[in-house]
Structure formats: structure tokens, C-alpha cells
Image (cartoon, helix red, strand yellow):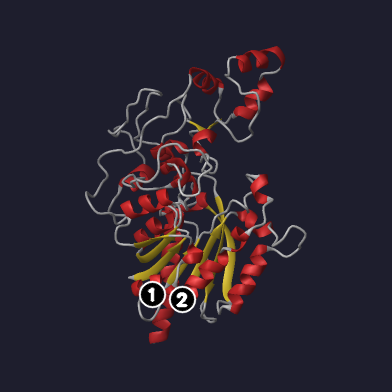
Amino acid sequence: MFTHIDCFSGPGGICTGFHAAGFDTRVAIEYVKSCVDTYIANHKHVHVIFDDIRNVTSAQVLPYIPEDGIDLVSSGMPCETFSTAGNTSRSFYDDRCFLFREGIRMAQISKAKMILFENVPAITTKTIAKNSKKRIVDLLKEELDQAGYANHIEIILKSTEYGVPQRRNRFFILACRFPDWHLSPPAPATDKEIPVSDALAGLPNIIPNSGKEGKKYLKTSSEYADLLRDNIFWKLLGTPVCGEISYHMSMKHRACTLERFALLQPGESLKDLFIRYTGKEREELQSRRVLPKKMFIKRNQRIKLGEPSATVTSHCLDEFVHPIHDRALTVRECARLQSFPDSYDFAGGPYITPHIYKHIQDKYEQIGDAVPPLLAYAWGKKIIQILEENANAANS
């Protein structure tokens, strides 16, 4: 089995896909406690280091690494300073912009054959300083060259082409320390987009404010929903098929919020309501708090059944409304859109917490910040193919 170190591991999206593909993750490094709790609950075989990666030493890593080195290091460093979704965060220039160096350092410590970097596409336009013209990715590639990983490719992949039911694009750099190895990205797994209807198939409706959790599957299903219930595909312990739904409970909504949701047509968001309702009509809705005083562009979008959702982010609880029912999505519904298997246990963190804590992420934040496991699976299969091809060449 091929070996892997998971840097900036989050709740385990990359590890979940890699494990299904055939990787053995030896070490994971994460500094958000709730993510660590979720990771450990699902990947008990992995040695998880709960710390800032900059503090992690070779002595903490090497006991878990084969003598001839690790096959792959993955490094999905925090994307807040690169994302265009938050212009305030993007304007920051601090040491988070250079955390890619830690992935390179871990690769050198573990004598990794390959490194996979992952981030938002906007990283390709972020500069190293406010008044500089030099891009972060150019510096990253320079330092890869200096570290002995001069053989590298970069690409932006569309998650929809790998069976993920959301329009989520991600930037990747795959680097290798062997100059003669041929590197290439995974070929698209499908030419058919998975719609939200397939993603949510089999999940019952949950009544807002009822406090009840839906645990029994409906008789209806889809090929996608069956895949997420297939514990054999995901190489998960227990029964072959997930038998009971978890984390499928609606959050509490005020009556005025439920009234707002009822106004939304498929594809519409809070922005559309501000366009539709003006003057006295808007003021009346605002007086009853059906509409807020301020318009938020990315808020309360009723996703469409017949197409993939927009990108699932750490703010997905506030950003998405169920395509049919007047409520926000449940944790399990968001996990479905991200392609987490139904058996996945989001053990860490509360259901909701303010987005101000460094070491606490609620369950929605964990899901939104993760790499979709099916996208990771595609990379895992491709990287194993590269490793096998070059191992065979070396032995011939």
C-alpha cells in the first residue's frame, strides 16, 4: 500500500478519498481541535498531530514513516488570504501566505516522492506583498525547485467532472523529486453533472424547530446516494452499507426567517429578494425582520434540484436553502454535496459556533473547508498509477 502524510488535514476529506483509492495515511497534522476530533473518529489508524504545523519536528513524524521515505505529502494550506469570497481577508499579507513552505519541509523530512498542493484558484493571482508583482505560486514553484522538486505540473480542476454535485473549482500543483517521471492530472471521471436531486436522494425532510433528527432512509435513491452509502467502496469498517442517517437535523429558524425562505424561488438568493421588493414593500418586510436591514450577496440561496449546487463553503449554513423545503440544509445534506460518505462521523465541534475561534469549527465549517473526498479519490488513483508505472520501470 502506498503511504501518505496529510498536512493541514482538516476533518479528513483528502484522507477519506485517498484511503478509498488505496493509500495508507501515516501522519496527519492539524491545529483546529474540532477537526482533529472528527479526523480521529473516522481515521483511527492515522497518527494525528494536534499542533501548528510550524511547531512539528522531524522527531514527531519520522517514527511513522517507512525507512525509504513516504510516497506522497498533501498540503491544503488555509485559503482565507487567497479567496475572493472575502475581500477583507484577501487584503491581508501575513505568514499564512507562505505556509506552503511547511508542506515542502514535511516532504523533505519524510523523503517524499511527491507533493500535492491544493487551494482555491484565486491563489494564482495573489502576490507575495501588497505592492509586489511576484505571485505566491511563482515563489512556491521556485522553492519547490530549490528543494529538489523541480518536476511539477499545475492545473485547476472542476469538481463536477469527478462526480461531486457542486460547482467547486480547485487549484493543484503536483510535484515530484524525480525529473524523468511523467506527471499528469486525473482524467475527468464523468461527463455527466450530478444534480442536487441525486445528491440528496434518500434523505427524508426534517421539520424546522422540531428538534427531531431523521435517521431512516427513504426508499428512493440514486447511483450517487448509493455510492455514499457503500462502505466497501470507501473501505470503512462495519456493515457493507450505511444503515442509519446521522447529523440530519434542521437548525432552529425564527418565524420571520422561515417566511423569507418561503419567498425564494429555485436559484434565488437574498440579493434577488432585495431586487424584487423595493420601497414601502421592502420596508414592511424589514420591519418584521423577514428581510434584514443589509443585503448580503452570498446568503440564503435556494439551490436547484436539477443541477449541481454552488461551492459549499464554511458558511454553507447561511448560504444555502433547501431546494424544496423552507429551511437551511442539514449537516448531512451539506456532507452529501461535498461527497463525504454517509458513515462519516462529524464528531468534533458543535453544530453552530461563531466564525471567530481559531481552534473550534462547527460541523458546517468543517465540511465547507474540506476537500471533496471524490475529488481526492480521483487524485489518489492517478498518483498511485504514476507511482506504479515508475516502480515497474525501475524494476525492469
Q: Residue at x 67, y 15 (%)?
A: 283
In the picture, measured across the screen, residue 40 lies left or right of residue 354, that is left
In whole angstroms, how far apart are the C-alphas of marks 1 and 2?
Answer: 8 Å
The amino acid type, in three-letter code, at marker 1 is Leu
| Label 1 residue SS | helix
User: Would residue 345 be visible to someone looking at this image?
Assistant: yes
**Which percent across, then down, holds residue 326?**
47, 24
Q: Earlier in the sequence, mark 1 or mark 2?
A: 1
Near mark 1 (Cα within 10 A), the count class, few <14, some 14-19 or many ≥20, is: some
Near mark 2 (Cα within 10 A), the count class, few <14, some 14-19 or many ≥20, is: some
The amino acid type, in three-letter code, at marker 2 is Ile
Residue underneath mark 1: 62
**Which percent across, then down, holds residue 64?**
34, 71
Residue underneath mark 2: 109
Quarter that holds the N terminus: bottom left
Q: Nearer the viewer, residue 170 or 287?
A: 287
Quarter that holds the C terminus: bottom left
